[in-house]
Image (cartoon, helix red, strand yellow):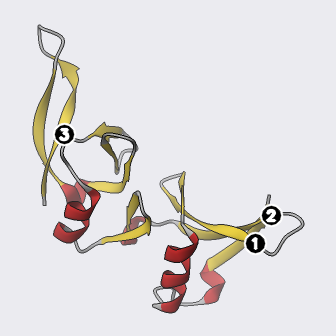
Amino acid sequence: MQLERYQKTRDLRGRAQTETCDSGGFVAFWSDHKYVSARDRDGTEWLLKHGTVLRDIEAGDEGLMRIHQSRLVRRDSVDELLRIRYRNSIDGFGVARVLGHEYRFSRDHWRKLIRQRLLESASKVQVQMR
């Protein structure tokens, strides 16, 4: 899918110019209040053009999986999946580690991941205490 991102350099008037890129070069997408950001394979964070929606990115690229209402990660770039438990509780949350950055799962999406058996074995998920 073709996306437009803002260049890191600015023009003479101080405005950021946009450039077209392919969504396959990014490993993670997340949305903040107004904008969608993305991280590429080099670890650089990019701001996508205003009007870009995670739902459109997810529909246009089959290699992505939704881990939260506001986060997408590329399946083949996930280094490890962690289940983080609180010290005195059974509750916890799931984390996908991609290129050294941690992206938190929502409970619903973690349960869907387990139900759909996208994990080949339970040994891939490590449990850590925090």
Q: In the rendered structure, are the residues bearing label 1 and label 3 in contact, judged by CB atoms less than 8 Å apart?
A: no
The circle on residue 14 is none
Q: Give neighbour class at mark 1: few <14, some 14-19, many 20+ (Cα, 10 Å).
A: few
Outermost residue, front side:
33
Q: Which residue is mark 1?
A: 91
Question: Residue, x 29% and y 54% (percent of image)?
Answer: 26
Q: Nearer the viewer, residue 126 or 86?
A: 86
Q: Amino acid at mark 2?
A: Tyr
Secondary structure beneath disc 1? loop
CA distance for labels 3 and 2 = 38 Å
Residue 127 found in image quarter? bottom right
Q: Nearer the viewer, residue 126 or 61?
A: 61
- Left or right side of 114 for 66: left
Tally the marks: 3
Q: x, y (%) of residue 72?
A: 38, 62
Q: Which residue is mark 3?
A: 49
CA distance for labels 1 and 2 = 6 Å
Q: x, y (%) of residue 76?
A: 37, 71
| First-in-chain label (1 vs 3) | 3
Residue 61 found in image quarter? bottom left
Q: Give neighbour class at mark 3: few <14, some 14-19, many 20+ (Cα, 10 Å).
A: some
> Is 37 rendered above or below residue 66?
above
Q: Quadrant of the C terminus?
A: bottom right
| First-in-chain label (3 vs 2) | 3
Q: Which residue is mark 2?
A: 86
